[in-house]
Amino acid sequence: MLSVSYFSYPDNEMYHLNRCNRISQDMPFVINCAGITATNEEYITHNERSRDDWYLLYVTAGTLWVRRHGTDYGYTSGTFIFFPPGCKYYYYHKPGDVIECFWIHYSGSDAEKAIKQYEFKVFPDINSINHDNAINSRYNNIFSTFVRNDKFRDRELSILFDRLLLSLAKRSVSVQKAKSLLSKSISFINENYNTDIYVPDLADMENLSLSRYNTLFRQITGMSPSNYIKQLRLNTACELLTSTDLAINVIGKSVGYPNQYFFSKMFRDNIGLTPTEYRQKR
């Protein structure tokens, strides 16, 4: 597991999730700490105490499972989340694929204003873009500034963080525009995910070639249409397992998997637990 952290000031806080937890209005953005986590192993982050500052979490690779309203949802590359001050959070990665996340804790005079100005969503709502390496560069510039640690560090961090937010906002607007091109088919998927859906039919629905449709879909969601449908089915199954007493085979049928063996195998391969184990654990 690779975990690199940068802190703005010494801190004796023993609870590591709340280190460098300060509120300051001295600059537009005051970066308390930042870092990167990358691993193919299981890891869990559960902050039950919450923090006083804002927390930006960005997924660059793999699938991160985030608990929202008591249900776990999987999010992939290009997903970014703003956890507001006082927010408790729980997310994890299952062993197998490689997960990579960038994270930043911050405050500042423009911290809340920027959320509204750039029209970002705040947790439990989720933001997403089509990830590209330019976003990595924005984060790496922030990390490099921590390493140099010169007398202008805090001012430079404030400027670099605003540039990062601007880059995320511009890409988010582009995704929203692209979504309008596929609004019919995405709405169809969301309403009929438990039926047999064929990607060529979705492309015809939008009057696009299959290759163009697949390209646009991946740009918008960060995954192929087939994976999007599978993820939607699994997310719904997780919700039903925790919020109802429906039998496993009934849940499988309700999300589009009439064969209970196939549903259980698909669930275990992607969630890491059988449906029964998931229900018991939750």
Image (spheres, rainbow, N blue to C red):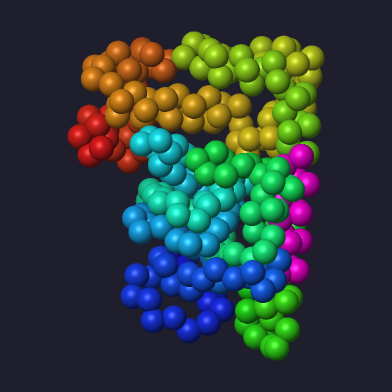
Considering the whole magenta stretch, tell me its main secondary structure: helix
Asked whether residue 44 is in view, the answer is no
In depth, the one of 1 and 4 nearer the eye is 4
In depth, the one of 273 and 235 nearer the eye is 235
In depth, the one of 26 and 159 nearer the eye is 26
In depth, the one of 264 and 135 nearer the eye is 135
| Quadrant of the drawing holding the N terminus | bottom left
What's the residue at 40%, 51% (across, down)?
88
| Quadrant of the drawing holding the C terminus | top left
In percent of width and height, residue 32 lies at 56, 71
What's the residue at 37%, 28% (across, down)?
239
In percent of width and height, residue 11 lies at 44, 81
Please say if 149 is above or below 209.
below
Q: Quadrant of residue 151?
A: bottom right
Q: Residue 160 colored magenta?
A: yes
- Which stretch did the figure color magenta? 158-173
Q: Is residue 195 left or right of residue 217?
A: left
Q: In which quarter of the image is residue 258?
A: top left
